[in-house]
Image (spheres, rainbow, N blue to C red):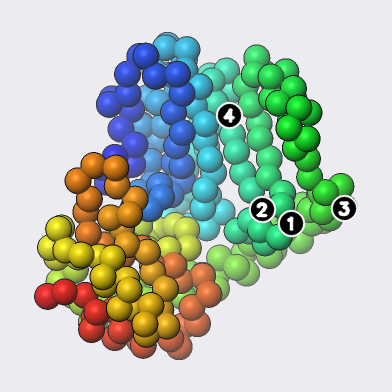
Amino acid sequence: MDDDGLDPALLHDSDAAVYVTPAHHYPLGARMPVARRVELVERARAWGQLVVEDDYDGEFRYGVPPLPALRSIRGAEACTAYVGTASKILTPDLGLAWLVPPRPVLPAVREAQDSLSLGASPVAARALAHLIDTGALGRHLARAARLYHARRDALVAALSARLPDLRVSGVEAGLHLVLLLADPAADDRATASRLLERGIRVEALSDYYLATPRAGLVIGYARMPESRATDVARAVAAAVPR
């Protein structure tokens, strides 16, 4: 992983599959550029690998042009399984998700679905289909994107004003950002605990590492009113180590 997300050059021909969230890598928030998407598909086709494309945060982007899904790249339909969910665009309570697998994998997917009794509520599925068919879902996403964009802008501006020396990443899409602490080895778990005592829940970036961690805070803003951005930034500034 780097600032452009997953690096296909670091994969091995012995890898059976790769799981990727190219629209907004979690948690650092990189967007995979087109060149890397093409390279990933080409490697997967050449090596017979399966690419699982989770369209995580693909619905919300701010001030940047849309990028094509891996699945839409020429030749990707033979090696890419596209996964999406209604959890963020509507609510996780619906329990709705979708999978578009490569055609050769489809029989195995159906068999697994039957054997595990996986399925969606027909009522919820029909309701979602109605929202799509009538254009209501598109209008809802447009309104939601404007709301989240405003909340993101308010939080980024407040953090920049209070902590101008710290880097904020992952702001081009999604519903969260990452504040990188000045000391990469700082105790970000302790910082997250201090913020929780103030009623602000964030995640420690180091919790997401398998190897040497990088200290930071993963801050979601979907439910943060714009009017609270300054308060949140003030609390973060008081909690982070200097």
Q: CA distance from mark 3 to mark 2?
A: 14 Å
Look at the image and tell me in which quarter the N terminus lies: top left
Instruction: Label 1: state its secondary structure.
Output: helix
Question: Is disc 1 surrounded by few (<14), some (14 to 19) or many (20+) residues within 10 Å?
Answer: some
Q: Residue at x 46, y 75 (%)?
A: 151
* Residue that mark 4 sits on: 81
Instruction: Label 3: state its secondary structure.
Output: helix
Q: Position of residue 57 (x, y in %)?
A: 51, 53
Q: Is residue 204 above or below residue 106?
A: below
Mark sitting earlier along the chain (2/4):
4
* Residue that mark 3 sits on: 123
Q: Quadrant of residue 103?
A: top right
* Residue that mark 2 sits on: 86
Q: Which mark is residue 79?
A: none
Q: Amino acid at mark 1?
A: Leu
Question: Is disc 4 surrounded by few (<14), some (14 to 19) or many (20+) residues within 10 Å?
Answer: many
Instruction: Label 4: state its secondary structure.
Output: strand
Please report contact status of discs 3 and 2: CB closer than 8 Å, yes or no.
no
Please report contact status of discs 2 and 4: CB closer than 8 Å, yes or no.
no
Q: Is residue 205 visible?
A: yes
Q: Amino acid at mark 3?
A: Val
**Left or right: where 23 falls relative to 168:** right
Q: Residue at x 74, y 22 (%)?
A: 111
Q: Amino acid at mark 4?
A: Ala
Q: Position of residue 119 (x, y in %)?
A: 78, 40
Question: Is disc 3 surrounded by few (<14), some (14 to 19) or many (20+) residues within 10 Å?
Answer: few
